[in-house]
Image (cartoon, rainbow, N blue to C red):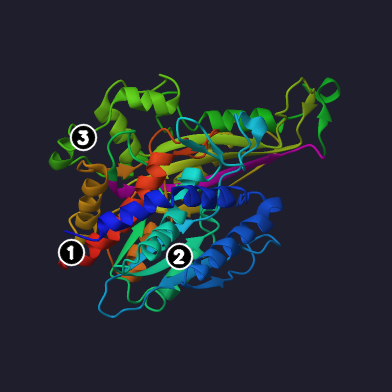
C-alpha cells in the first residue's frame, strides 16, 4: 500500500536540516497576536508563509479581514492557498495558525524564545515550535519533499492559515462560512494539525475539543492609582473587590461555583465508561508534562474525564495590578481580572455567559462596595466532537502505523481550536485532528519545544496521510 512512500520518507530525511532551517526562520518572527505592538510581525509571518507557498508552486493569496473590533489595529491576513487542481484526485483542506502566545526570556525561558535553539537531545526550542509553526510548516515541507523525490502529490491540497487563533480566531469564522461553498467547495475532508499526543510515546488521532469562553471583570473606583498610606482603609479598593469576586468562581479542587454550569454537561454513557482504560496514558507522563505531582485526581480515568469531557474554570491574570518584583505600596485605581471556562457537550455559549454574568454581578453586590464593576466575554469558541468512523480517520490511522509502527489512540483534547466546528459546518465534511507534537512540548508555557523526531516523522506522517487518503474508498 502507498508504494511511493519510501522515496518520500527518504527525501524528508535528506532535507531535515533544511526543514529545521525553515522552522528557525518562522520562529524568528515574533508573531504574538495578543500584543498590539507585535501586530506588524504577525502580518510579516502571514507574508512569509504566502511567499514560501508561492515558491513551492502553490497558488497563494492573502485575505484581509479589516480592523480588529474595538481597536485601530488591522487584523492579520488569512493565507489561502491551493496546491494542485486535478479533478481525479481527492482534495484535502488543511488549517493551521501562524500566530503564537506571548513569550519573554524573563518569563523564565532557558533560551531566547524567538531564536530556535537545537538542543543535543533533539529538542527544537522556541515559541511556536509546536504550537503551531512546526505543524503548519509540516504541510509545506511535505510538498517540497514530494518535489525533491519526484513523486506525484497524491491529493489536491487547500490551505487556510490564520494569524489570530491564540486570540479567539477573530475574523476567521465569517471567512470560513463565506468560502465553505466557494474556495473550499471541492474539499473532501479537513485536517488540522494543532494539538498534541497524550503522552510522549503513543501517537493519537483526535476527534474532540473543549470550547473556550474568555471573560474580563473590570473594577474601578479611584480617579488614579493611590498611596496606600494616605488612602488605605478609607477608600474602597478595586483589587480587594476583584480578588474576592475571582476567588468565589472556583474551588481549589477545580469545582466551579457558578450554578447552572454542571447541569448542562452531557451524562456519561455506558460506552464512554469503557473508553478510558485502553488509552495509553499514565499519571507519570502527566506529572512529567505538568512539571510537578500537583494533580487533583490520583487516577487516570478521572483525570482524562476532567480534561476531555468536564468544564474547567481557570484564573489567568489581573491587568493593572502591581506585578513587578519589589514592594510598591500602590492601590491600583482600575483592575481587570481575566478568566476562562473550557466548555464541553452540551454547554451553550450564550446560556453559559448569562450564568457567569449573573453570578459575578451577585458576588460583587454582596461586597457592598462603592466601586463600579463590569463583566463581559472577550471571545467565545464552541466545543467540537466528531465521529472518528470515517475514511479520513482510517487514512490517518494507516499513516500513523506506517510512520510510527503503532496504532494510534483515539483521543479528545482539553484545549480549543475555535474554528474546527465552523469548518465542519461550512464544508459539511469530516474534520480530523492529526497532532505532531507530544505532551511534554510546553505549548503556551516557557521553553516550548518540538522534538526533532516529532517534527521530521511528523512531516512524514502528514505526507503519508495524504497518500492513504488517496487510496481510501469513500464511506
Ligand atoms: N493549539 C490550540 C490552542 O492553543 N488553542 C487555544 C485557543 C484559544 C482559545 N481562546 C483563546 N485561545 C487554547 O487556549 O486552547
Ligand atoms: Zn495552536
Ligand atoms: Zn495555542
- Looking at the image, do the residues carrying marks 1 and 2 touch, with CB atoms under 8 Å apart? no
Q: CA distance from mark 1 to mark 3?
A: 28 Å
Residue corresponding to mark 3: 276
Residue stretch rendered in magenta on the structure: 205-223
Judge from the rendering whether residue 272 lies leftward or rightward of residue 37; answer left or right.
left
**Which quadrant would residue 231 be assigned to in this image?**
top right
Image quadrant containing the N terminus: bottom left
Residue 178 drawn above or below residue 20:
below
Front: mark 1 or 2: 1
Image quadrant containing the C terminus: bottom left
Residue 259 in view in this figure: no
Comparing 63 with 377, the one in front is: 63
Comparing 206 with 302, the one in front is: 206
**Which quadrant would residue 190 be assigned to in this image?**
bottom left
Q: Which residue, as the protein is rendered here, is positioned at the far right? A: 230
Residue corresponding to mark 1: 472
Residue 283 in view in this figure: yes
Residue corresponding to mark 2: 160
- Looking at the image, do the residues carrying marks 2 and 3 touch, with CB atoms under 8 Å apart? no
Question: In percent of the image, x 29 and y 57: which residue is there?
Answer: 7
Amino acid at each position: 500500500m502507498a508504494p511511493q512512500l519510501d522515496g518520500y520518507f527518504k527525501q524528508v530525511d535528506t532535507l531535515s536540516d533544511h526543514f529545521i532551517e525553515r522552522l528557525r526562520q518562522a520562529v524568528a518572527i515574533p508573531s504574538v497576536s495578543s500584543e498590539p505592538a507585535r501586530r506588524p510581525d504577525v502580518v510579516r509571518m502571514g507574508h512569509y508563509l504566502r511567499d514560501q507557498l508561492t515558491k513551492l508552486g502553490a497558488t497563494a493569496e492573502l485575505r484581509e479581514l479589516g480592523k480588529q473590533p474595538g481597536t485601530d489595529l488591522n487584523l492579520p491576513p488569512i493565507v489561502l492557498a491551493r496546491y494542485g487542481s486535478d479533478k481525479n484526485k481527492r482534495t484535502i483542506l488543511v488549517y493551521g495558525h501562524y500566530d503564537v502566545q506571548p513569550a519573554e526570556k524573563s518569563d523564565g525561558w532557558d533560551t531566547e524564545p524567538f531564536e530556535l535553539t537545537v538542543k543535543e537531545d533533539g529538542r527544537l526550542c522556541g515559541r511556536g515550535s509546536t504550537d503551531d509553526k512546526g505543524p503548519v510548516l509540516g504541510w509545506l515541507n511535505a510538498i517540497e519533499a514530494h518535489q525533491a523525490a519526484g513523486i506525484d502529490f497524491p491529493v489536491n491540497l487547500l490551505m487556510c492559515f490564520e494569524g489570530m487563533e491564540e486570540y479567539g480566531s477573530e475574523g476567521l469564522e465569517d471567512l470560513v462560512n463565506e468560502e465553505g461553498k466557494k474556495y473550499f467547495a471541492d474539499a473532501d475532508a479537513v485536517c488540522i494539525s494543532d494539538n498534541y499526543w497524550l503522552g510522549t510515546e503513543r501517537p493519537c488521532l483526535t476527534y474532540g475539543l473543549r470550547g473556550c469562553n474568555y471573560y474580563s471583570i473590570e473594577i474601578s473606583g479611584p480617579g488614579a492609582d493611590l498611596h496606600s498610606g494616605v488612602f488605605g482603609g478609607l477608600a474602597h479598593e478595586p483589587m480587594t473587590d476583584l480578588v474576592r469576586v475571582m476567588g468565589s468562581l472556583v474551588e481549589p479542587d477545580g469545582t466551579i461555583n457558578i450554578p447552572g454550569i454542571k447541569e448542562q454537561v452531557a451524562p456519561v454513557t455506558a460506552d464512554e465508561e469503557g473508553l478510558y482504560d485502553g488509552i495509553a496514558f499514565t499519571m507519570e507522563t502527566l506529572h512529567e508534562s505538568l512539571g510537578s505531582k500537583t494533580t487533583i485526581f490520583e487516577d487516570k480515568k478521572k483525570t482524562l474525564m476532567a480534561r476531555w469531557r468536564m468544564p474547567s474554570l481557570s484564573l489567568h491574570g489581573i491587568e493593572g495590578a502591581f506585578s513587578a518584583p519589589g514592594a510598591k505600596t500602590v492601590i491600583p485605581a482600575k483592575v481587570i481580572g481575566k478568566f476562562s471556562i473550557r466548555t464541553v457537550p452540551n454547554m451553550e455559549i450564550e446560556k453559559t455567559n448569562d450564568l457567569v454574568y449573573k453570578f459575578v454581578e451577585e458576588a460583587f453586590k454582596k461586597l457592598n462596595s462603592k466601586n463600579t464593576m463590569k463583566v463581559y466575554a472577550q471571545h467565545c469558541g464552541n466545543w467540537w466532537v466528531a465521529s472518528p468512523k470515517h475514511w479520513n480517520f482510517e487514512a490517518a490511522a494507516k499513516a500513523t502505523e506506517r510512520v510510527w509502527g503503532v496504532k494510534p489512540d483515539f483521543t479528545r483534547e482539553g484545549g480549543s481550536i475555535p474554528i474546527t466546528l465552523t469548518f465542519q459546518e461550512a464544508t459539511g465534511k469530516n474534520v480530523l485532528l492529526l497532532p505532531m507534537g507530544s505532551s511534554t512540548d510546553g505549548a503556551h508555557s516557557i521553553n516550548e519545544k518540538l522534538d526533532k523526531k516529532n517534527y521530521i516523522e511528523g512531516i512524514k506522517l502528514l505526507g503519508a496521510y495524504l497518500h492513504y487518503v488517496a487510496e481510501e474508498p469513500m464511506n
